[in-house]
Amino acid sequence: MKRKNETPVRGFQRAKPFGRRRHSPLPHFRTPSGALGAVCAAFFLVLLLVQTAWARPSRDVAAVLSAMSLEEKVGQLFTVYFEGPAISDDLRSMIADYHIGGVIYYGVSGNVENPAQVAGLSGEIQKEAAKTPRGVGLFVSVDQEGGPVARLRRGVTLFPSNMAVAATGRPKNARIAAEITARELAALGINVNFAPVADVNVNPGNPIIGIRSYGQDPAKVGRFVAAAVRGYAANGMLCTPKHFPGHGDTAVDSHLGLPVVTHDAETFARVDLPPFKAAIAAGARAVMTAHVELPAVDPSNAPSTLSRPVLIGLLRQKMRFDGLIVTDSLGMGALAGTVGTVEAAPRALAAGADVLLFGADKGHTPDQQRQAYARVLAAVRSGEVPPARLDESIGRILTVKKGLGLLTAKDIATPATDARVLAARIATPAHLRQAEKIARESMTLVRDVKKLLPLKNTDRTLVIRPAKGAPDVDEPAIKALSAWPGTEVLTVSPDPAPDEIAPAVARARPVQAVVLLVSDAAKRPGQAELARSMLDAAPDKTVLVASGAPYDAALFPKAPCLAATYGDVPVSLAALGQALFGDIPFKGRCPVNIAPRESAVK
């Protein structure tokens, strides 16, 4: 029996502790049969008892934990990247000799070629885990946020960015995207998605979050984050709202350096925390940390990933979060360039982190994973990290793995690799229609003061797009743009030089319409100059489109026609064409402020 608006119990729902209540915690049923009411009450009691199992290790989890050697426990902390599309000798050693708890897939590491290959790799990884003494399955994880951050881009349903989803105004769309993403990842043997982004992007110059965020309003961001969390949980996928305690008002990319969040305590509580509170209330069983300094909480200025006041004092004690704390990659520049990747591992564990993530960061090698393993092992043996702190994390890891069906690797179903089976589960027509629908609802018209829209199907239209330099991004984008009626696509450099700008402007002379896409133009002066030159030469036929962060729109306050797509995934570019040519209305509303900047290009 399911009541209206009732959240499904399946997945990781936050358990509410039993205690004294004025009324029974069980639902009240008005039925003609007392027996039926008793059956229903018993059913919900069972569900409540199942929920409370997440709060403490079960008997079988405790048995596995007690049987583990110290070396096995330390290994369970590690989720690591590896190289190649198949299990290498190096990865086989990491599983057998270092007892790792999980892996993470990257395109840059050669792990992702096509869905069948990924499914086969996931199955082989769990078979290797089944050979270990304890036979515990592995976390198989990926960053599949949608939009610009998606390791799987071909042969799967690729959703628009989070900011595009928020532009629809419907949190339900965040849940739909999460549900479908979860099902498709599960079909490939992936059980952890490092998503959704819970950062509130209040800084237009933020170099790393941008359209990965749902927007700048904390309450609205919280609603979308909570919807996504529920979507993942309802489909058996562990998700990790990130990047705690908040990366939305930073001016440094933590992949490169150590950002500082300068919010005072009141601003931090009002701006950064609400989405994480919403995620926890929605049942999130894991949270990913940010490598940011937060003086308002930790005056020592330790990076939050290594900060006990942030992880234990704030997240555990004040926010009462009892799930997994997963670090962002310890190989990122914020830590590698300060305390060092190897030293960060025991410090993160001591601060309260449970899962130590080692991603495919520039300058980072798999050998550092082994060095970090040895360093953590030594820290526990010496008492630098109390054994109880280690056992606490391993208990959480095993409990979550049990909930995911990973406690016994040999019982994990092997993903299908047959193309026909995968076609029925991944990038299905129904899934693609949902992605297309979200994209269409997100298209935003900032202004059209000269009524240049809709464009005419019979006109010749020149579309100019800055390249991203990645084939798995550029090729699908060009294909989507080329499908527009009467369109010629011109690709320019990300930051075009003057000798590239002049020919582009000349190419616009014989056509009836120009659609000029800009992306991150504030940091690429060549793009801004191309836009200025085009608007000067052809103001009555140029449609400017912010195809990345919508903040670019603020650079051109006098552009007569301006739209925003919040990213250039194929479904968004296809929807843009439909909106520009009048096939669909512009329905989106921008989730961030794009008021003109002082440095705006006229």
Image (spheres, rainbow, N blue to C red):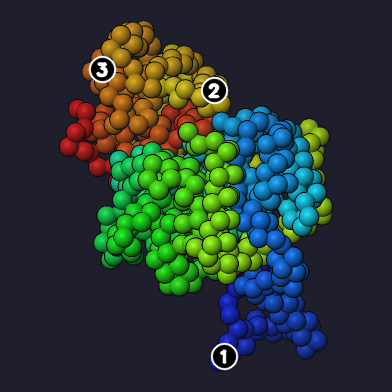
Q: Mark 3 points at which residue?
A: 533
Q: Are marks 1 and 3 in contact (CB under 8 Å)?
A: no
Q: Nearer the viewer, residue 464 or 308?
A: 308
> Which residue lies at the image location 58% right of the left edge and 77% below the top edge?
16
Q: Separation of disc 1 and disc 3 at Cα?
A: 71 Å
Whether residue 482 can be seen here: yes
**Within 10 angstroms of label 3, few (less than 14), some, or many (20 or more) residues?**
some
Q: Taking 223 as reference, is 207 above or below it?
A: above
Could you tell me the amino acid type at mark 3?
Answer: Ser
View extreme (front): residue: 382
Amino acid type of the residue tagged 1 in the rendering? Arg
Q: Is residue 450 above or below residue 189?
A: above
Lower sequence index among marks 2 and 1: 1
Residue 455, percent across and down?
41, 23
Which residue appears at 43% of the width and 42% of the height? 336
Residue 415, labelled with which disc? none
Write down the residue under mark 1: 20
Question: Between 275 and 268, which is closer to the camera in this rendering?
Answer: 268
The residue beneath circle 2 is: 471
The picture places residue 246, in percent across and down from the top left corner, at 39, 55
For mark 3, give the secondary structure. helix
Q: Nearer the viewer, mark 1 or mark 3?
A: 1
Foreground pick, 384 / 128? 384
The secondary element bearing badge 1 is classed as: loop
Q: In this view, does 576 lie to the left or right of 190?
A: left
Give the foreground label among 2 and 3. 2
Image point 67% across, 48% down: which residue? 98
Quadrant placement of the N terminus: bottom right
- The first of marks 2 and 3 along the sequence is 2
Q: Give, as a three-letter code, the residue at label 2.
A: Pro
* Secondary structure of the residue carrying numbered label 2: helix
**Left or right of residue 153: residue 493:** left
